Image (cartoon, grey):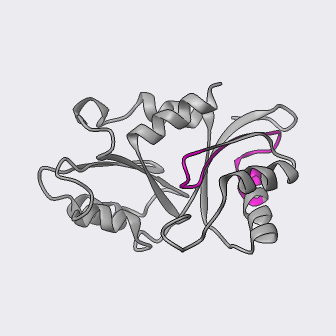
């Protein structure tokens, strides 16, 4: 946990950016606007709204600062999920599926704003069609899609708003790359 005053590293995951012509966000512009908002050592990864940054504030303050800066500068009201570098390290270390996921692009972690209600978590588990595997673990859902993500009902559910909480997914290759970026 970060304490106010100490710089902490965070990973900010924007939901639904740069999908076709929808919510177009330039990563250099995003870095600049977040730096102008007082966040430090801002780095982006890929074009899909992955940001690593430093802040003296806590997770909620980082989320609010990012949302406000994006809205005020770009006119976009984007949803996002924030994890500290330490939280991301724990997610990677405790992954329930990494050992069995042969292709890191077919292993997804869905990051949730808050834990799912039990009934929604059960609906997620029920959406997995063999040979898919899914584990709901606190504020993350780990899903292995060995036959691909494109036609998976589970992947569709995780990408929709039907979970009732802000959620955004990243493949395992991106998750581990973000951890590495947050650790440097």
Specify whether residue 46 is painted magenta. Answer: yes
2, 63: nearer the viewer: 63
What range of the chain is rendered magenta? 45-64
Residue toward you, 14 or 25: 25
Vertical comparison of 7 with 147: above or below: above
Side (left or right) of 102 relative to 164: left
Q: Residue furthest left?
A: 130
In which quadrant is the C terminus drawn? top right
Q: Residue at x 74, y 75 (%)?
A: 75
Number of numbered tags placed on the structure image = 0
Residue 141 on image: x %, y %: 38, 51
Q: Residue at x 48, y 50 (%)?
A: 139
Q: Nearer the viewer, residue 56 or 18?
A: 18
Q: Is residue 56 magenta?
A: yes
User: Residue 44: x, y in percent?
Assistant: 64, 45
Asked if residue 135 lies left or right of residue 31, the reply is left
| Residue that appears at 48% across and 70% down | 20
Vertical order, 96 against 130 (above or below): above
Q: Quadrant of residue 5?
A: top right
Q: Is residue 111 left or right of residue 158?
A: right
């Amino acid at each position: 946990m970060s304490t106010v005053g100490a710089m902490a590293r965070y990973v900010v995951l924007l939901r639904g950016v740069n999908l076709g012509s929808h919510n177009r966000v330039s990563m250099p512009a995003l870095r600049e606007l977040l730096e102008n908002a007082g966040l430090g050592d801002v780095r982006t990864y890929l074009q899909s709204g992955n940001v690593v940054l430093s802040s003296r504030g806590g997770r909620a303050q980082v989320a609010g600062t990012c949302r406000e800066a994006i809205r005020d500068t770009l006119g976009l009201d984007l949803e996002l999920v924030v994890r500290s570098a330490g939280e991301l390290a724990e997610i990677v270390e405790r992954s329930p599926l990494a050992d069995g996921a042969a292709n890191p692009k077919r292993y997804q972690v869905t990051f949730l704003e808050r834990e799912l209600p039990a009934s929604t978590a059960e609906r997620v588990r029920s959406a997995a069609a063999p040979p898919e595997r899914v584990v709901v673990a606190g504020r993350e859902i780990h899903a292995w899609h060995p036959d691909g993500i494109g036609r998976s009902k589970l992947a569709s559910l995780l990408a929709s708003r039907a979970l009732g909480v802000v959620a955004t997914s990243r493949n395992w290759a991106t998750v581990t790359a973000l951890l590495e970026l947050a650790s440097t």
